[in-house]
Amino acid sequence: MKYIICGGSGFIGRELTELWLTAGHQLIVAGRTLPKDASSHPALSYTTWDDLAASPELAENADALVNLAGASLSQRWSADGKRAIIQSRLETVEAAGKLVAVLKHKPPVIVQASAVAIYGTSLTDTYNEDSPARVVDFPSEVVQTWEAAADAAYQDIRLIKLRTGVVLGNESGAFPKMKLPYKLGFGGRIGSGKQWLSWIHLEDIARLIDYCIRTPEITGPVNATAPNPVTNEQFGRMIGKVYHRPHWFPLPAFVLKAAVGELSEILLEGQRVLPSKAVSHGFTFSYPTLQPALEQLKSEK
């Protein structure tokens, strides 16, 4: 198979690249610039958006396009920061849409990154792919705008909108920051601790992308979360258990808000999200529950 990964040098993209190279597929990784630490593999090539626009034939006959590109939400949400977060997503969707539009042999499926923030936040509700979108804060506004752009950009092609939760991996993402206080001996709940955390192991999100592409019946929103979400309190206690560290030092909401401003919403608010579509179509999680997921991550280090 021939696959194109936009944002392939990022956290999830690197895991997906490794999975597909191991399986013997041909990969094209596209980004704004060529990575400085590009991997060397005979089945892997790197290109830029500008090069693809000038030579779209490079993308002909691809079996799928995966767009994971977008600036991280983990930055202070100043006015300029918010514009950069939204624009980075819209620009990559637009670029991917323009590329696909000029291809003679278009990919039969596109996987577009999204996020569970589209459901809004709640301490009591449970969400699946049939739940409506709710704009209640900046993250939900970003994701709704992002998905609307994808719907407009990718016409008459099977589109997977991959609504990711918190992706657990050692090299990047939120998890290294979340476990750091425990490693220093100051771990504890954040805010009330009652807010939900819908998570997924890095290995499972790469496998889920692959599964969605290979399963023609799957289309539209797909929640990329493990089937057993936990509260912030439960998550913290499990980190303490697996890493043999105390769970005792709470971080009050007002301290976090003072430290990082509006960005604190990511940690103080949450939603209980279930991967109903993935499960109903037969996907099996390698890490459906938290403890084995954390134990595997610990064993990597």
Image (cartoon, rainbow, N blue to C red):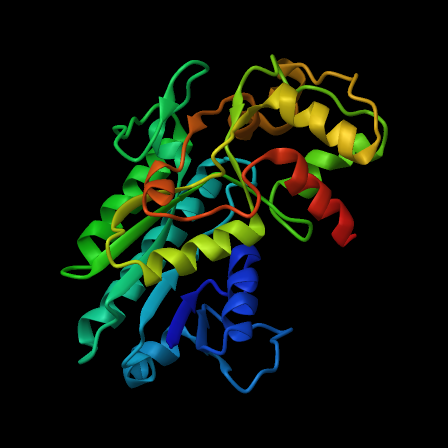
Extreme residue in the left direction: 156
The percent position of residue 238, horizontal first and vertical second, equals: 70, 28
The percent position of residue 282, horizontal first and vertical second, equals: 37, 48
Question: Which quadrant of the figure has residue 153?
Answer: bottom left
Quadrant (top left/top right/bottom left/bottom right) for the N terminus: bottom left
As drawn, 260 above or below 188: below
In depth, the one of 40 and 301 nearer the eye is 301
Residue 34 seen from this side = no
- Looking at the rendered structure, the number of numbered marks drawn on it comes to 0
The percent position of residue 216, horizontal first and vertical second, equals: 25, 59
Residue under the point 15% across and 59% down: 155
In depth, the one of 71 and 11 nearer the eye is 11
Residue under the point 57% across and 27% down: 267
As drawn, 34 above or below 243: below
- Is residue 211 left or right of 95 when viewed as pictured? right
Question: Which quadrant of the figure has residue 288?
Answer: top right
The percent position of residue 13, horizontal first and vertical second, equals: 51, 61
Residue 161 seen from this side = yes
- Is residue 54 left or right of 225 when viewed as pictured? left
Residue under the point 49% across and 51% down: 205
As drawn, 113 above or below 2: above
- Is residue 39 left or right of 242 when viewed as pictured? left
